[in-house]
Image: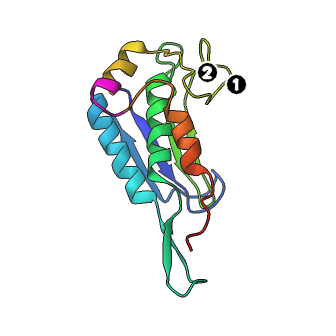
Amino acid sequence: MRQEPSVRYPGAEIGELIQDQKEVDGPLAELFRRLDEIIATNIEQRSDLSASVENTYPTYPRVALQELIRNAVIHRNYEATTSPVMLSWYADRVEITSPGGPCGMVTQETFGQPGLTDARNPALASAAKSMRFVQRFGSGIPRAQAALRPQPPCP
């Protein structure tokens, strides 16, 4: 696999000094494991002291970031560009960019509809599924969207 960089900026702009940078490559399973480590390292825990007991919450749900970065790697365009998948962390957001955009039946309008899938790289998608990094085709984006929805506070 090609190198896929992860960059952490301390602020909200790309022009800021880089706080941390990793380039990840290797076989698919190793690539996903290393990306999982980067996700785990960069997710911060926030404390909520408004209740009688302190509650901590992650800044981002791990499952959402895993689904999104794996989707970006699996479905990227490997033929028309040498641009990598980018995982960029900022103080106020995480951005994942993947060369190629939607393909086939998946368009900007239908992106994320449960069960709708079209693999730009079917062999890579099948390999990721057989290695159990993805569960089933067409379910990753809806699972990420559900994990990113605000959760009601616990009683």
Looking at the picture, how far across and down is residue 18, in whole percent?
Answer: 52, 56
The residues bearing labels 1 and 2 have C-alpha atoms spaced at a distance of 7 Å
Assess whether mark 2 and mark 1 are in contact (beta carbons under 8 angstroms). Answer: yes
Q: What type is the residue that disc 2 sits on?
A: Pro
Residue 108's mark? 1
Looking at the picture, how far across and down is residue 107, in whole percent?
Answer: 67, 20
Q: Classify residue 126 as left or right of residue 78.
A: left
Residue closer to the observer: 68 or 41: 68
Q: Is residue 117 magenta?
A: no
Q: Could you say which quadrant of the image residue 50 lies in?
A: bottom right
Residue 102's mark? 2
Judge whether 56 appears above or below 126 on screen: below
Helix, strand or loop for the magenta stretch, by majority: loop
Q: Which span is picked out in magenta?
A: 129-133
Q: Residue at x 30, y 42 (%)?
A: 33
Residue 76's mark? none
Q: What type is the residue that disc 1 sits on?
A: Gln
Q: Residue at x 43, y 34 (%)?
A: 70
In this rendering, does residue 95 appear at all? no
